Image: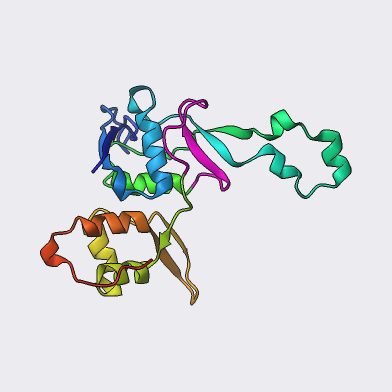
Amino acid sequence: MTTVTISLRYGRTAAGVKVPAPQDTVELERLSPRARALALAVAASLGGKAGPIWLEADRPYGESWEHRPPEERDAYADPARDARRALQEWNDWDRWYADDTADAYWYLERQAAKLPEGWHVLGPDPHTRVADPEQPADDWYSEDAAAHMGIAVSGVRTTLKRLGVRPYRHEPAPGGGVRAVYSAAAVRAVHAARPRAHKQQHQEMP
């Protein structure tokens, strides 16, 4: 188990009272790949505090010319530039008050869901990668979590909440209403950590 202790919260309560910003210790294995990369980026930042981090494009500049006419590629392509990847700074953290009862896993998954598609986390320094490039997030619905954990679908929300896992977003359900979306990595991690006596033998989902 690998943990990091980081400062994600604002140094005030929701009522505006100034307090020392509390720190949160998180187990990296309980996070989805993108949320884990965010946690590592914060841990590598000055003072371990949430702040500006750098993102790198998944594809190099040159691949943007693939669908352009040949004459444009010939006129504007630059081999030295086209081999590089674009960088951008990201600092779109939600304000998280010191007395909020939500946990750090929920918060990090929420922030990871806001990262732009086609970009991955580098870290606080644009020249240093703090984590391996993230794989695409593996989303699970209540039915997926229930099958993996060997419990009824109706018990997923309360069981995962008790284990410290909350949905990191909601989306429209096919039949109307909304449905919760969980990080599959987080569900797998908390289920693996449950007392063996409470586990049920089942075939793990791919």
The image quadrant that residue 181 belongs to is: bottom left
169 relative to 192 in the view: left or right: right
Along the viewing direction, whichever of 22 and 48 lies nearer the viewer: 48
151 relative to 83 in the view: left or right: left
Number of disc labels? 0
Q: Quadrant of the C terminus?
A: bottom left
Residue visible at 30% across and 58% down?
A: 188
Along the viewing direction, whichever of 39 and 22 lies nearer the viewer: 39
Query: Outermost residue toward the right?
Result: 71
Magenta stretch? 114-133
Looking at the image, is 150 positioned above or below residue 55? Answer: below
Q: Position of residue 100 (x, y in %)?
A: 29, 43
Residue visible at 75% across and 47% down?
A: 66
The reply to whether residue 95 is in sight is no
113 drawn magenta: no
8 relative to 86 in the view: left or right: left
Residue visible at 41% across and 39% down?
A: 38
The image quadrant that residue 42 belongs to is: top left
